[in-house]
Each structure stands twice: as structure tokens, then as C-alpha cells.
Image (tube, rainbow, N blue to C red):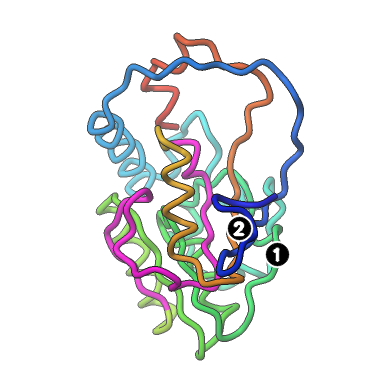
Amino acid sequence: MSGPGGHGEGHAPLRFKLTLRRGPMTTHVPKLSLADLRVEIKKEYTNVALDPNKGYHFHTGRRLANILGYDEKLYAGLPESNIASFAGTGNPFAVGPINPGETVVDVGSGAGFDSLIAARLVGPTGRVIGFDMTDEMLKKARAGAAAMGATNVEFREGLAESLPLPDNFADVVISNGVLNLMLDKTATLTEWFRVLKPGGRLQVGDILVERAVPAEALDDISLWTG
């Protein structure tokens, strides 16, 4: 599957694991404010950071990682607090390898679960930058990196659709459970594509709905935030 702009010179191929089926589509534009949506997302994931075992309408933590097919060796030794607040929807490491020496950007890094795994995979000559907009998640991710002594990973505040990075920066962009939260998915993917180096890789774990979503569901902010 090619990304925005296709496979022309200087463009990076985008790699997904998707099963595509032809089905009914909707042209309904959600009646949501981007600002309101961000507020609700921050509220929900602040709770996941502070109280991961509270019980949500989505799975979290070690159980979720196992459901999504993570090799336990990948996260063995990660701080338990970072594992507990993991709330992804897929496994970006199942899409393709992360190699030693690479620069990885993790969009919507949350408590740092995927970023800390990536930091191990890229090794001391590589670099990982995680971006998130939720303060409590950033605090937890930074604490986890410090506890591991991981100096090749950092966590910055940032928005998925407006990354404060130059063009052609990353070998790999990973993301997990973020794209489904974006109102403008085309603009978001275009931004991720922008920061990839020529020949870079986009490895995403997310939700794919195989049927048309009713308009009333698209307008329900509670269904967007978790």
C-alpha cells in the first residue's frame, strides 16, 4: 500500500498489515470540535496514566499486550507502571523490524510502552522520540526511561497532526491506537509521511472498521475517546 504521493522519487513506502474489504462508506462529517475532542482524549488517558487498573471499556496493560501478540521478550524488564498503562489497539512491531541505529518517532506514545521497546531495538546508536499531548502520560513515560537508564529515548509534548520535527527526519514512524482518534486522518497521515526519510517506514497498529459507521455514532464524542 502506498502512502500520500505514492512511490515516487524521494518518497517513503508506507507499510501496513490490513485486510481490505469493499463495503458501504459514509460521507458524514462528524459534528465535533477538534478542541473538545482533544480535551476529552486528555481526560480519558490521564485516567489511564493515573489509575490503569480502574477498568475501562478497552483493555490495558500486560493482558492487552498478550492479546495483541507482543512477544513477552520485547517488554521483559520494562517498569511495571509503564506496562500497566499501555492502551494500544495493535502491534506496530508485527508490521516490520526496528533495526539497530535507526531513528524512530512514536506518535501518541502514551506511557512509553512502545517507545521503550523501540529504544531497546535501536540500541545505543539509535534514537527514539515519543510524542504525546497528555501530561500524565509524558511524566510516566519519562520516569520509565529514567528507571531503565535509557538515554536514547526522549518524550516530548506534541500533536499527532503537527509534529515539531523537520522533513525527512525518521527512519521509522510508529503509532498505536492514535489514528482512529483523529478527525482528519488524511492530514494526519500526510504529516507522519512528511517526517519520514526517503525509504522510511510507517508501522501502525490501529482499528479498522469494516462497515459504515452510523452518523449518530460519529457525532458521539464518547465513542471517539476510548
Would you place residue 189 above or below residue 116 in this image?
A: above
Asked whether, in this view, residue 121 is left or right of residue 94, the answer is: left
Tell me if residue 179 is in the magenta stretch: yes
Q: Earlier in the sequence, mark 1 or mark 2?
A: 1
Q: Amino acid at mark 1?
A: Gly
Expressed as whole percent of the image width and height from the top left, the position of residue 38 reads 28, 37
Residue 149 visible within the image: no
Q: Is residue 121 left or right of residue 180?
A: right
In this view, the residue in front, 100 or 55, is 100
- Give the labeled residue for mark 2: 203
Relative side of 177 to 143, left or right: right
- 111 up-or-down from 53: above or below: below
Examine the rendering and report whether any part of residue 123 can be seen. Answer: yes
Residue 20 placement: quadrant: top right
What's the CA distance linking mark 1 and mark 2?
7 Å
Pinpoint residue 166: horizontal percent, then vertical percent. 34, 70
Give the residue type that dot 2 points to: Gln
Per the image, the residue denoted by label 1 is 96
- The secondary element bearing badge 2 is classed as strand
Quadrant showing the C terminus: top left
Q: Which label belongs to residue 77? A: none
Picture residue at 58% right of the left edge, 43% below the top: 206
Q: Is residue 4 above or below residue 30?
A: below
Q: Residue at x 56, y 81 (%)?
A: 122
- Residue 169 picture quarter: bottom left
The image quadrant of residue 184 is: top left
Magenta region: 153-181
